[in-house]
Image (cartoon, rainbow, N blue to C red):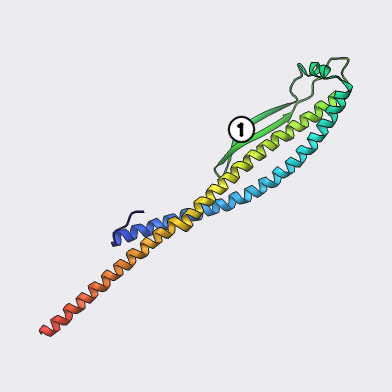
Amino acid sequence: MAQQPPTKSALLNLKRQVAFLQEGHDLLERKRELLTRLVYEHLTHYRQLRREAHVALDDSYYWLSITHMRMSSRQLRQAAQGIHPGLSVKILPRSSLGVEYPAVTVERQPLQPISLLWTDASLDETRSKLVELAMVLARLGEAETSLRRMVAEQRKTQKRVNALKYNVIPRYQAAVRYIQSALEEEERNALFQIKVLQEQGKKGC
């Protein structure tokens, strides 16, 4: 900030700027508090989804191993050809407190039958488990992305709050105190000169 001349207009301008900066600091502090609350809420949801993903992953690999034992890798590849997707995924933008992240909507689709006589019954269970896993992973991806972006925004907001609180606002307040002190000194000098002139006037009479 450039050195301000010690004038009343400069003092009023600096006071307005300090008030504006203080208001901005309060708004950022409020945003930081809300972001911190959202981070903790999303973190709880994210941890829950991670637990669900581990369970779904274990179930999927369990049934896949059974199917793999009962059917060869070649038969599995042949059965997988032409299978319709077991779910539909829609990704739309979403925003919260200025933080944009994808909102994932996952819908399960009916599993289409496989018209191959040599397929094992465990294949249908494997397909169902893999669909459940994919649905959980889609929700987990949304939760992780939103959490990561909210944490980044929370840290950025914290830096701005600290910069205003410990750097910018104190410099402006120091400039206000300097100008106030200079104006008070000028006022004291002016009063002293008036008093001297009055004394000289009395002596002249």
Q: Which residue is mark 1?
A: 92
Q: Quadrant of residue 136?
A: top right
Q: Secondary structure at mark 1?
A: strand
The reply to whether residue 54 is visible in this rendering is: yes
- Percent across and percent down for residue 186 are 26, 69
Compared to 146, does 35 lie above or below? below
Compared to 72, does 163 lie above or below? below
**For residue 49, side relative to residue 126 (left or right):** left
Compared to 87, does 17 lie above or below? below
Compared to 186, does 112 lie above or below? above
- Percent across and percent down for residue 185 are 29, 70
**For residue 196, side relative to residue 181 (left or right):** left
**For residue 157, side relative to residue 54 (left or right):** left
Residue at 76% from the left image edge and 16% from the top image edge: 82
Residue type at numbered disc 1:
Leu
Residue at 78% from the left image edge and 25% from the top image edge: 110
Q: Quadrant of residue 72?
A: top right
- Percent across and percent down for residue 175 are 36, 61
